[in-house]
Amino acid sequence: MRYILITCLFIPFFSMAQDPIAIGCKLNSEKDPFTKEIKISTGFIPVDGGSVTIDATKAEIDFLFSIEGVDRCYDNNSTAFVFFEGTKLKLTARNGGSMNCEGLFHFIFRNTATLPSMLTKMTTQKINHIVFKGNNNKESTVNLSPADQQLFMALAACLVNESKTLIQ
């Protein structure tokens, strides 16, 4: 009897329910104490070369990339080239955040009922890697492994779907 009980206690550790994608849409939600505005977030997703978090408010959806390394300065003229798996096409985007030397790069989209094409592409196609070009013309690359690609797509799509509820 004791062995059956111990075996039953370890079943959750070996099940697919522990996989973040299998769990479903698990997002962080917080309410600003001053404006009473709700903000939802994926939390930080570690990737090779940095990390990314996706936040949504009533007004915007923000993909914040934190790039590792030294001398990573980005301003509004800095660009990012997003390369998708299985295609030679790439997207080009400018930094939507303020000037910084902490390695922070923003893709900012308006939170509207219809999705911009770049946002749709980022949530439905696997991103192979992103090359960030700073204001000193230095390039930094963030690579996404196949597991990172699946997690990024699942969390991004989940957050974008949930962000529509904030508009109302």
Image (tube, grey):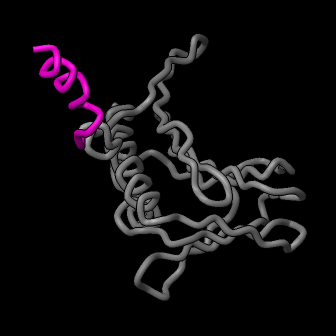
Where residue 90 appears, as percent x and y from the top left, is: 53, 80
Residue 99 drawn in magenta: no
Q: Nearer the viewer, residue 2 or 48?
A: 2
Q: Could you say which is closer to the camera, residue 1 or residue 65?
A: 1
Residue 23 versus residue 124 in the image, above or below: above
Q: Quadrant of the N terminus?
A: top left
State the image coordinates of residue 101 (x, y, percent, origin top left): 86, 51
First to last magenta residue range: 1-16
Q: Residue sitting at 46 percent across and 31 percent down?
A: 40
Does 87 appear above or below 47? Answer: below
Number of numbered markers: 0
Which residue is drawn at the image coordinates 52% and 64% (left, top)?
144
x then y, percent, for residue 83: 53, 76
Residue drawn at x 50%, y 49% as measured from the top left: 110
Residue under the image location 78 percent in, 52 percent down? 103
Q: Is residue 101 left or right of residue 126?
A: right
Q: Which of the two residues, 98 or 144, is positioned nearer the viewer here?
A: 144
- Residue 136 vs residue 26, the one in the foreground: 26
Identify the image quadrant of residue 114.
bottom left
Residue 107 in the image: above or below residue 127? above
